[in-house]
Amino acid sequence: MTSATDSPRFVNSSTEEQRAKQYGIPNLQLALEGLHQDGMVVLGGVVNVDHCTKLYDYMATDRNRLMEERHANGEGFNQGVQSNILQCAPLTKPELLFDDVNFNPFVIQVLNAYLGYQPRWIFSTGNNALSGTNGMRQPVHKDTRYRHPKCPFLVVANTAICDFTIENGATEFWLGTHAFTDETCQTTVDSKDIQRDATASWKSVIGEPSTPIRPEAVEARRHIRPPIQALMKKGDVMLRDMRTWHAGMPNETDKDRIMLAQAWAAPWYPNYTCRLELPASNAEYFLSRAKSFPMQLQADMVSDKQVEDNQHRDNFRFAPNEYLEHYKTAPKNYKYPFQY
C-alpha cells in the first residue's frame, strides 16, 4: 500500500518567476530541499501544455509502430514487465522541438544548484505506461547497475505530457531512499537478467548489482516511510535523484500515460561514454540553445536514421568509466541508523 498522507514537494512559480524564467531564492530552496530530503521534487507548470499535447498526440500514435517493430516478440520491455516501454521524444522532428521541453530554464537552474555548475545533459529517453495494463507493475528498483556514489551525481528530469493519476499509473516513489541506499540493497545479476537485457546497449555481468531492490529491503523501508505515487499535471516536470527507489505502476485507463526523460550528470562525475545521440539535421537548434545556458551537452551529432534506430532502446550506460578501482574497492564510507 502507498502512503495516503506523504507527498513530494511541489514548486509553484510566481508570475514574476515565469516572466524571468528563474526561481527566486525561496522556491529554489524548496526545490533543493525536496531533492536533498526526498530524492525528488515536482516543478509545477513549467512546460507549455500545448507543447505537451502535440508531443503526446505524436507519441501515442507512434507507439503502435514501436510495439510492432521492437516488442512483438515480448522482448525489450522496461524492467522486463510488459506494461512499460521506453519511448523517447521525437528528436528528429523540427516541428516537435520545444525549448521549454529540451532546455527548460527552471530545470537547468535547479540542477546547477544541486549537481554543480554546468551539469551535463547526457541522455534522453521516455516512459510509456501502456493503456489497459491492469495489475502489471514493475519491481521496486533503481536505475543503477553499479556501485554508485553516495552523493548527488545524476538526476532524471521527467516531463509529464499528460496528467498523471493513480488510475493511469503515476510512478511509485520511495521518498528519502536516495540518502539511505547503496548497492547492497539491490539484487545481483543472474542468468534471467542476462536474458532480459539481451537487447540493451550494455552487457550485464553475473554477480554485479542489478536494478531491483531486494524484497527484504523493500519491506524494511516500508515500515520507515511507505511509498507514494507522484501525481502530476500536464506540463509539470519531476526531478528525481538517480538513487531514489521507484516503480512503474499499472495503467488501468484506455489511454497511454507518457513522460519524457532527460538524464543530467554532475560536472565532476567521471562518465564520459554515455553520450546523447542528436540528429545532425537539427544540430543548430541543439547547439545554439545549449550555449545560452550554464550547461554542457555531452552528445554526438549523428544521422536521423541512427537517432531513430537507437533512441527507444535501453542505453542506460551511467556507470563511471574512470577511477574504476575506487568504485570497485572503496570501503563503505557512511553509516546510518537505518540501512534502508
Image (tube, grey):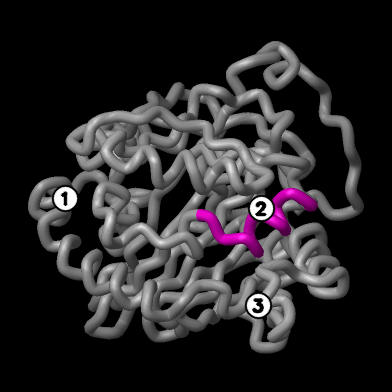
Determine the main secondary structure of the stretch shown in magenta: helix
Question: Dot 2 corresponds to which residue?
Answer: 241
**Alpha-carbon distance for marks 3 and 1?**
41 Å
Task: Locate residue 124, reporting x and y percent.
Answer: 43, 46
Query: Which of disc 2 and disc 1 is earlier in sequence?
Result: 1
Identify the residue at horizontal 47%, vertical 55% (top origin).
Answer: 102
Q: Which mark is residue 18?
A: 3
The magenta stretch spans residue 40:
no
Q: Which mark is residue 71?
A: 1
Residue at point 36%, 58% (across, down) = 97
Out of 216 and 261, give the one closest to the viewer.
Answer: 261
- Name the front one of labels 2 and 3: 3
Percent of width and height locating residue 26:
86, 74
* Residue type, mark 3 in image: Gln
Going 50% across and 64% down the picture, which residue do you hit?
100
Q: Specify whether 7 is left or right of 126.
A: right
For marks 2 and 3, give the CA distance: 25 Å
Seen at 37% across and 79% down, the residue is 50
Disc 2 secondary structure class: strand
Q: Is residue 73 shown to the viewer in this render?
A: yes
Q: Quadrant of residue 42?
A: bottom right
Determine the CA span between mark 1 and mark 2: 29 Å
Q: In the drawing, does residue 315 fall left or right of residue 11? A: left
Residue 150 position within the rendered picture, expressed as x and y whole percent measured from the top left? 77, 39
In the rendered structure, which amino acid carries the disc numbered 2? Asp
On screen, 96 above or below 330? Answer: below
User: Is residue 308 shown left or right of residue 160?
Assistant: left
Answer with mark 2 or mark 3, whichever residue precedes in sequence.
3
